[in-house]
Amino acid sequence: MAHNHEPEYLIIPTENGKEEKFEILYTFDHDETGKSYMFVTPVDGEQGGEPDEQEPYQEVMAFRYTEEDGNLNLEMIEEENEEEWDMVEEVFNTLVSELEEESEENEQ
């Protein structure tokens, strides 16, 4: 995904106590729920995909978050919450489509 600004990063501790660095790709507020969300991708992670695939994929994770006193508090989105996941996926797919359109326009 392309950026028109300086990347922002955050450190997320894993279950085994290790800390991983993630780049914040996009943040948004949902008007109906009043909740804030972010898409992040691992900085040190390798791109996925099978060797015969034409384009590797980039792992992207979605979190709900709050901000208090300059600190971000991340919350996992429950797997069972299909309505919330559908909304997050719709925003993500729209963002990807817009970025692909921009990329195609820049190539012309």
Image (cartoon, rainbow, N blue to C red):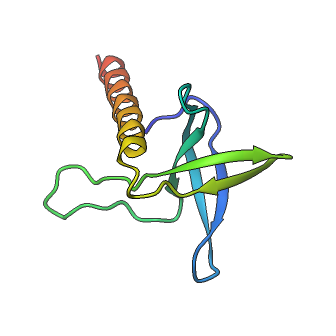
Residue located at (33% from left, 34% from top) = 93
The vertical placement of 76 against 1, above or below, is: below
Relative to 23, is 99 on the left or the right?
A: left
Residue located at (16% from left, 56% from top) = 53
Relative to 97, is 41 on the left or the right?
A: right
Q: Can you say which quadrant of the picture contains the C terminus?
A: top left
**Residue 89: where, in percent of width, then height?**
36, 40
Location of residue 106 by image quarter:
top left
Residue located at (35% from left, 40% from top) = 86
Residue located at (32% from left, 22% from top) = 101
Q: Can you say which quadrant of the picture contains the N terminus?
A: top left
Figure disc tally: 0
The vertical placement of 3 against 102, above or below, is: below
**Outermost residue, right side:** 69
**Residue 92: where, in percent of width, then height?**
39, 37
Location of residue 79 by image quarter:
bottom left
Residue closest to the eye, 106 or 78? 78
Residue closest to the eye, 21 or 65? 65
**Residue 81: where, in percent of width, then height?**
40, 51
The vertical placement of 86 against 79, above or below, is: above
The vertical placement of 95 against 42, above or below, is: above
**Outermost residue, left side:** 52
**Residue 67: where, in percent of width, then height?**
75, 45
Residue closest to the eye, 61 or 45? 61
Relative to 37, is 83 on the left or the right?
A: left
Location of residue 14 by image quarter:
bottom right
